[in-house]
């Protein structure tokens, strides 16, 4: 007789434990089953904790096996009639979370019963289930009258039922309004009336913190009928500032900022603004992540109401253990709060920050010193003295950031702090970052007539012109031209050298274009060059807001959300709706717009094609040749243009270039372009302060003093 080997393995052990007579073993087995998500038994149990675990398993199981979940429907329906309200609520919540199409039809009858249940816990759970069902099948919710029941539940005697009902109606409202075809008569639109407003204000103080946030968000959407109603809302919401939860506090602040617009009494406005400060200060004692969210929202509030925290500068001083992201936000807010009364304390604090070990924080601190100087005229000299002390430390990144900041101070206060220039120039060797180099070059070029060795200093950058970054090249080019216009006798050689290098050896089209423009200006009309290059620049200032006024008002209505943290509208980072017929229709509209854009592009090409040389401005259209729309019709017959118009172009840029390269239908300029715009023997090589040229592009067919055979590679278009 053969003996069967004992059965072993994890599955067998789970099976035995699931059917064990001991409650703890069964519970432990269910927990292990959920962790592995492989098997599940013993649905019929009277133990609430086990039932919760089994239902949790089913919610995960339904995602992969929706056709098998229908086998558990009878259990759910049965549990909605259980004497225990916790079991009834658990069953209706689980059915709402399964998100399986086959189970939706079985959900309606139990949901109807639970919405009218005698127990408020079941009613508040059922209210949220309606929102989940609307997300799956909106027409089912409307046909069964669930929305009307929710509207009636706003008058419920239990504040938590009211809060969950408001949350459900708000979610349905957001889903309904996200559809492009939604009208104001849509049943899903949640319109808050004066009677609903009164019920929300009554329930506000009795809700949990989540309920208060939902009610406050609904109050923020309400349009007050008159000034009295706005004042009433503000007075009822102000007590929420004392709540321990930061989300409730920010939601209450949002309601105040929205409804304060309808308040006309100055005394009440000042009183409300005064009451905003303590809760905002309290939020800064929260963990770093909550602090950062609070700081981003405070930044927005200060852009609208700068006087909210005018006496609370010290609260924003950085602590040694603050993360970098918190410190940077605090610096920005400190600059916003800076005034003549607290600028000394601010500068002392910023000077301390400049000796920290965190390089990014040090740079931001030095930049804040410069912003303070630009913002407060009376404190500019003190800021400059602090910057000079920092430059004296000879720390590389400190010196470089200080040079960048000094450039902004010179822009704000021209010809005021010229005594600092020798100190800046003496630190030329310390600079290795493009922004710092460009800033010092700008200072040298701007004050070239007052710096004796300006040509030598700029010559250092001209020698390494090709190796420098593009911003440094652009700034060097402009500074050298400024030097030439101020000191033409001593700087002809360096300006000829930099223009020659920029037009022939530089691979940046921006640098080459600027060099050609300067060359043309200097060779034709030095007076015009002075008017352009040495033109008076308006002083810079610190913008009061970082976003447009309209966007600021929109973001203030989104306080305590991601939009107020990112300082961007929500549609820029949150997608809406599903891919369907609407998106296909929009795509068709976009294709029509693309064809129209292509037609406009061809018209532009036709209008501009007559200008072969980018710097020749004297060409005139020949009579009898088409232009504008007529030229577009001719161009559209080419294969490249046909591809563009049909939207079938695989490379639109190449097709546009090929249109330029086609046979010309417009008269092309016959004006010769010399080998050098300045000429060989005249110009910068002569002793005259004003450069002279043998032939300029405006001379038409004038003959150069020393004619050179025209070479295609030296034509401006040839360089490209």
Image (spheres, rainbow, N blue to C red):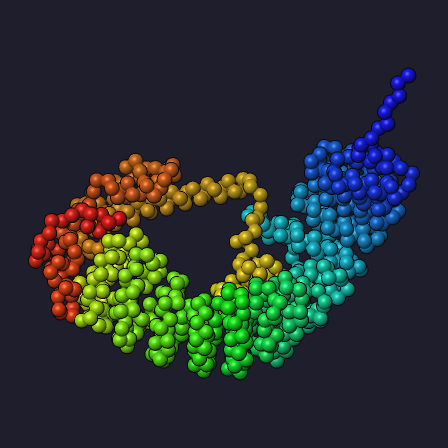
Question: Between 254 and 352, which is closer to the camera in this rendering?
Answer: 352
Q: Which residue lies at the image location 29% right of the left edge and 67% below the top edge? A: 458
* Residue 387 figure quarter: bottom left
Question: Between 501 and 62, which is closer to the camera in this rendering?
Answer: 501
User: Left or right: where does residue 182 sit relative to residue 668?
Assistant: right
Q: Please tell me whether residue 125 is drawn above or below residue 70 in the rendered image.
A: below
Q: Please tell me whether residue 1 is drawn above or below residue 498 in the rendered image.
A: above
User: Left or right: where does residue 663 sit relative to residue 704?
Assistant: right
Q: Which residue lies at the image location 87% right of the left edge and 41% below the top edge? A: 25
Q: Position of residue 536 (x, y in %)?
A: 30, 73
Q: Residue furthest top?
A: 1
Q: Position of residue 355 (x, y in %)?
A: 52, 72
Q: Which residue lies at the image location 54% right of the left edge and 53% below the top edge? A: 573
Question: Between 451 and 246, which is closer to the camera in this rendering?
Answer: 451
Q: Position of residue 254 (x, y in %)?
A: 62, 66
User: Left or right: where does residue 278 sit relative to residue 580?
Assistant: right
Q: Which residue lies at the image location 13% right of the left edge and 61% below the top edge? A: 693
* Residue 267 figure quarter: bottom right
Location of the N terminus by quadrant is: top right
* Residue 617 figure quarter: bottom left
């Amino acid at each position: 007789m053969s003996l069967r080997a004992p059965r072993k393995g994890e599955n067998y052990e789970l099976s035995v434990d699931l059917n064990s007579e001991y409650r703890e073993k069964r519970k432990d087995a269910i927990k292990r089953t959920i962790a592995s998500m492989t098997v599940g038994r013993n649905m019929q149990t009277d133990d609430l904790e086990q039932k919760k675990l089994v239902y949790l398993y089913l919610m995960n199981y339904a995602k992969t096996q929706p056709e098998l979940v229908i086998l558990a429907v009878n259990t759910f329906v049965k549990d909605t009639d259980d004497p225990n309200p916790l079991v009834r609520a658990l069953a209706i919540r689980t059915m709402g979370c399964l998100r399986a199409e086959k189970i939706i039809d079985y959900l309606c009858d139990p949901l109807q019963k639970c919405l009218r249940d005698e127990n408020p816990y079941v009613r508040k759970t059922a209210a949220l289930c309606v929102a989940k069902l609307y997300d799956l099948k909106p027409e089912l919710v409307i046909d069964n009258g669930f929305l009307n029941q929710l509207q009636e539940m706003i008058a419920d005697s239990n504040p938590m039922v009211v809060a969950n009902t408001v949350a459900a109606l708000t979610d349905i409202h957001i889903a309904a309004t996200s559809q492009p075809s939604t009208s104001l008569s849509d049943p899903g639109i949640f319109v808050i009336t004066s009677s609903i407003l009164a019920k929300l204000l009554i329930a506000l103080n009795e809700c949990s913190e989540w309920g208060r946030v939902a009610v406050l968000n609904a109050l923020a959407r309400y349009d007050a009928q008159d000034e009295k109603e706005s004042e009433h809302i503000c007075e009822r919401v102000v007590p929420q500032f004392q709540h321990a939860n930061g989300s409730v506090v920010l939601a209450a602040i949002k309601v105040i900022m929205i409804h304060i617009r309808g308040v006309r009494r100055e005394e009440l406005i000042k009183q409300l603004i005064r009451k905003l400060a303590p809760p905002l200060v309290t939020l800064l004692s929260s963990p770093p992540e909550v602090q950062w969210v609070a700081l981003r929202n405070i930044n927005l509030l200060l852009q609208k109401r700068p006087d909210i925290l005018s006496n609370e500068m010290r609260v924003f001083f950085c602590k040694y253990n603050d993360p970098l992201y918190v410190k940077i936000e605090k610096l920005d807010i400190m600059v916003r709060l800076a005034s003549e009364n607290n600028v000394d304390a601010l500068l002392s604090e910023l000077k301390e920050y400049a000796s920290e070990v965190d390089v990014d924080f040090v740079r931001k601190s030095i930049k804040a010193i410069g912003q303070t100087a630009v913002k407060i005229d009376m404190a500019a000299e003190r800021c400059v003295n602090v910057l000079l002390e920092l430059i004296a430390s000879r720390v590389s990144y400190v010196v470089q950031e200080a040079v960048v900041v000094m450039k902004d101070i010179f822009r704000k206060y021209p010809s005021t702090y010229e005594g600092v220039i020798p100190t800046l120039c003496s630190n030329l060797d310390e600079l290795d970052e493009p922004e710092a180099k460009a800033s010092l070059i700008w200072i040298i070029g701007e004050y070239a007539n007052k710096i004796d060795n300006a040509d030598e200093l700029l010559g250092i950058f001209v020698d390494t012109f090709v190796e420098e970054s593009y911003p440094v090249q652009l700034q060097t080019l402009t500074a050298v031209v400024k030097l030439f216009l101020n000191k033409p006798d001593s700087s002809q050689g360096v300006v000829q050298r930099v223009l020659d290098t920029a037009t022939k050896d530089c691979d940046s089209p921006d640098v080459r274009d600027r060099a050609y423009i300067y060359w043309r200006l200097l060779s034709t009309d030095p007076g015009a060059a002075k008017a352009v290059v040495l033109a008076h620049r308006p002083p810079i200032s610190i913008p009061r807001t970082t976003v447009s006024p309209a966007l600021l008002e929109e973001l203030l209505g989104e306080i305590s959300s991601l939009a107020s943290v990112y300082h961007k509208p929500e549609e820029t980072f949150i997608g809406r709706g599903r891919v369907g017929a609407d998106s296909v229709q929009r795509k068709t509209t976009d294709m029509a717009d693309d064809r129209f854009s292509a037609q406009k592009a061809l018209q532009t090409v036709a209008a501009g094609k007559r200008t072969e040389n980018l710097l020749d401005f004297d060409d005139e259209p020949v009579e009898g040749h088409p232009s504008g729309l007529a030229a577009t019709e001719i161009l559209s017959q080419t294969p490249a243009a046909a591809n563009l118009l049909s939207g079938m172009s695989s490379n639109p840029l190449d097709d546009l270039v090929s249109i330029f390269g086609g046979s010309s239908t417009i008269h092309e300029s016959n004006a010769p372009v010399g080998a050098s715009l300045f000429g060989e023997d005249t110009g910068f090589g002569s002793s005259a302060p004003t450069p002279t040229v043998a032939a300029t592009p405006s001379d038409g067919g004038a003959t150069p003093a020393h004619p050179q055979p025209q070479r295609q590679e030296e034509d401006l278009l040839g360089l490209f």
